[in-house]
């Protein structure tokens, strides 16, 4: 069975590579409209990426601001053709991680029985599911699974891009993604997603 | 294609995340106030080609030993290279007398074209004949098996069984009549180990092979999903074309791998391999690097130590060649075998990467850094190359 999706622009929203290159060129020329265009397109994505790591809206806002200020300075380090979205997400993620390290804050993984590998009590699952938001459920995942879900859902990266950022083989990324979805599906019934 | 649950989950998660988002206009004001003036400066965006180059070192009249792997029946060495033009030139032999120039250039900077598109865009369609595969080596004892295939490839189910993905070259494949199974010896390229895997024939269910048209080809390189049961690895869903890496930097796979389809892909026109070939019109191709099965993606080129190590191997081989030119072929093979094993034991060569192609008297191996090395045993014959 053929698929009708072979080549062309990604279905994911955002600038094309050429548009991004153009924006960077404008930044290098000292034109703030280049940065503004990137901000307009990716500001929320960057915020979401950072937020998924630091889990503090206030800190995420600070880091996101710093990100774009820094982007203005380091635009000349961008190498065209390597996937700008991945480049942006990688920098944002690293800044968020650095922030956490500076604050010596640890992310606590909730040991929720609902997300364990072994099936848990049905009644417990139901009560937990009632309380859990998707955010809380994602935060309860194992670290790599959580990172992959965030990079996929929030940063909107492809599996290939995720594998490069996390430095893990693509097969591992896709496998862990599916595992994470299975866990989330056990906790979050369809009606909760309406 | 994403499931409905996946779509809804993503949408809900994004919605929850956006609740925390600040006023973006105010944030821009804050950002803009923090920007320093920058003077315009001329800067072109340069694009780097992939820094993994195949360094092909040569030595004259090298003798290499079959390494005891008599089952190794490459009709042509399967050599992976990321610099196709260099390999092709070398394979021709005519331009350089059969000896190979080192092709260890790291990065190549070049000006982008006018439209500044990334280098290496795929066309909408490619033809199977455009791709470069190792010459096929037929298995001598493989019967013609064709069972009714009832299994259906579903990526999520395959992934749920997969313990790991491996990048392997098929060193041998033979049919075990008693077990009604194909037995493979696979060289794990990244792990530099050997894997012995058996795949039984059946109807495609329970990870059986329904047809010998899906049997892995000797000398070819694949990305395989492996499951584990009772301490043994098995190929998950063998009744389909496996993801294959070509010699010219592409990856060929069937479009049931929806994850792979997220990369830039081209439709691959393939010949139909019999009336029971259900995949011939479902094949796709992407750049091998997009699949990124190597954990090491530094792409920084060779380090000084790596270059020194390669030179150590080269010097050792060259010295050996010089001293053994008059020796009978078999003895040279034996001696070179000892040399290469010794270099492998010291970590200069990947032990299980050493292959010998008797048909052209050529050894190939991988240096510890992953670059390809080739050594020719027999004198170059312009009539044969």
Image (spheres, coloured by chain):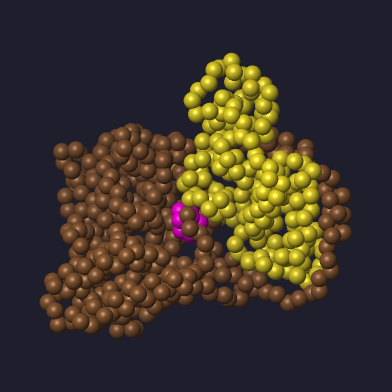
Chain colours: A yellow, B brown
At x 73%, y 35%, the residue is B16
Q: The C terminus of chain B appears in which quarter of the rendering?
A: bottom left
Residue B289 part of the magenta segment: yes
Residue B80, compared with residue A160, is above or below; it is: below
At x 63%, y 43%, the residue is A150
Q: Where is residue B377 in the image (x, y as percent from the top left)?
A: 22, 75
Q: Where is residue B94 in the image (x, y as percent from the top left)?
A: 31, 82
At x 54%, y 17%, the residue is A121
Q: Give the range drawn in magenta.
A: B285-294
> Would residue A163 be found to the left or right of residue B336 on screen?
right
Asked if one can make out residue B134 in the rendered structure from this viewpoint, the answer is no
Q: Residue furthest top?
A: A123
Quadrant in which residue A80 is drawn: bottom right
> Would residue B364 be found to the left or right of residue B108 on screen?
left
Residue B205, compared with residue B176, is above or below; it is: above
Residue B81, compared with residue A140, is above or below; it is: below
Residue B152 part of the magenta segment: no
Q: The N terminus of chain B appears in which quarter of the rendering?
A: top right
Of A185 and B245, which appears nearest the observer?
A: A185
Of B85 and B276, which appears nearest the observer?
A: B85
Q: Where is residue A86 in the image (x, y as percent from the top left)?
A: 62, 55
Quadrant in which residue A78 is drawn: bottom right
Residue A149, compared with residue B95, is above or below; it is: above
Q: Residue furthest front?
A: A104
Asked if one can make out residue A159 in the rendered structure from this viewpoint, the answer is yes
Q: Where is residue B227 in the image (x, y as percent from the top left)?
A: 37, 39
Of A121 and B144, which appears nearest the observer?
A: A121
> Would residue A115 be found to the left or right of residue B277 on screen?
right
At x 43%, y 70%, the residue is B306
Of B93 and A64, which appears nearest the observer?
A: A64
Q: How many marks?
A: 0
């Amino acid at each position: 069975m053929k698929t009708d999706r072979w080549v062309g622009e990604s279905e994911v929203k955002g600038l094309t590579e050429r548009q991004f290159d153009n924006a960077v060129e404008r930044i290098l020329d000292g034109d703030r409209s280049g940065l503004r265009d990137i901000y307009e397109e990716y500001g929320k994505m960057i915020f979401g990426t950072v937020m998924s790591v630091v889990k503090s809206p206030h800190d995420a806002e600070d880091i996101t601001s710093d990100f774009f200020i820094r982007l203005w300075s380091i635009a000349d380090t961008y190498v065209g053709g390597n996937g700008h979205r991945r480049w942006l997400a990688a920098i944002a993620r690293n800044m968020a991680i650095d922030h956490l390290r500076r604050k010596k804050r640890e992310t606590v993984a909730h040991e929720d029985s609902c997300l364990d590998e072994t099936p848990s009590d049905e009644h417990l699952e139901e009560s937990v599911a009632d309380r859990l938001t998707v955010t809380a459920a994602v935060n309860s995942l194992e670290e790599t699974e959580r990172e992959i879900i965030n990079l996929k859902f929030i940063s909107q990266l492809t599996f290939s891009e995720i594998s490069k950022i996390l430095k893990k083989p693509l097969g591992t990324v896709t496998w862990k993604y599916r595992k994470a979805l299975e866990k989330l599906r056990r906790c979050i019934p369809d009606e909760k997603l309406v | 294609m994403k499931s409905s649950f996946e779509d809804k989950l993503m949408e809900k998660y994004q919605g929850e995340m956006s609740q925390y988002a600040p006023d973006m206009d105010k944030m821009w004001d804050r950002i803009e106030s923090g920007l320093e003036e920058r003077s315009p400066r001329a800067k072109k965006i340069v694009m780097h080609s992939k820094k993994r180059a195949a360094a092909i070192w040569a030595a004259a009249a090298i003798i290499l030993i079959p390494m005891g792997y008599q089952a190794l029946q490459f009709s042509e060495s399967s050599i992976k290279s990321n610099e196709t033009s260099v390999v092709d030139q070398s394979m021709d032999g005519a331009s350089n007398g059969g000896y190979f120039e080192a092709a260890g250039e790291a990065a190549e900077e070049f000006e982008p074209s006018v439209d500044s598109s990334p280098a290496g865009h795929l066309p909408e369609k490619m033809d199977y004949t455009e791709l470069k595969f190792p010459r096929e080596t037929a298995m001598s004892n493989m019967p013609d098996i064709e069972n009714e295939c009832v299994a259906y490839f579903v990526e999520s189910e395959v992934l749920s069984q997969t313990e790991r993905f491996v990048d392997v070259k098929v060193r041998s494949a033979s049919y075990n009549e008693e077990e009604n199974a194909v037995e493979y010896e696979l060289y794990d390229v990244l792990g530099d180990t050997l894997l012995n895997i058996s795949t039984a024939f059946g109807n495609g269910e329970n990870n059986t092979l329904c047809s010998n048209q899906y049997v892995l080809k000797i000398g070819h390189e694949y990305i395989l999903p492996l499951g584990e049961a009772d301490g043994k690895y098995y190929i998950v869903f063998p009744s389909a074309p496996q993801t294959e890496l070509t010699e010219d930097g592409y990856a060929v796979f069937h479009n049931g791998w929806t994850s792979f389809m997220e990369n830039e892909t081209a439709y691959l026109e393939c010949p139909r391999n019999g009336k029971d070939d259900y995949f011939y019109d479902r094949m796709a191709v992407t750049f091998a690097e997009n699949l990124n099965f190597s954990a090491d993606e530094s792409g920084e080129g060779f380090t000084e130590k790596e270059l020194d190590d390669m030179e150590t191997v080269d010097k050792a081989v060259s010295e050996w060649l010089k001293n053994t030119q008059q020796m009978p072929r078999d003895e040279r093979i034996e001696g070179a075998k000892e040399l290469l094993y010794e270099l492998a034991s010291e970590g200069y060569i990947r032990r299980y990467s050493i292959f010998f192609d008797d048909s052209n008297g050529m050894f190939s191996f991988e240096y510890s850094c992953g670059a390809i090395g080739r050594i020719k045993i027999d004198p170059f014959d312009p009539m044969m190359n």
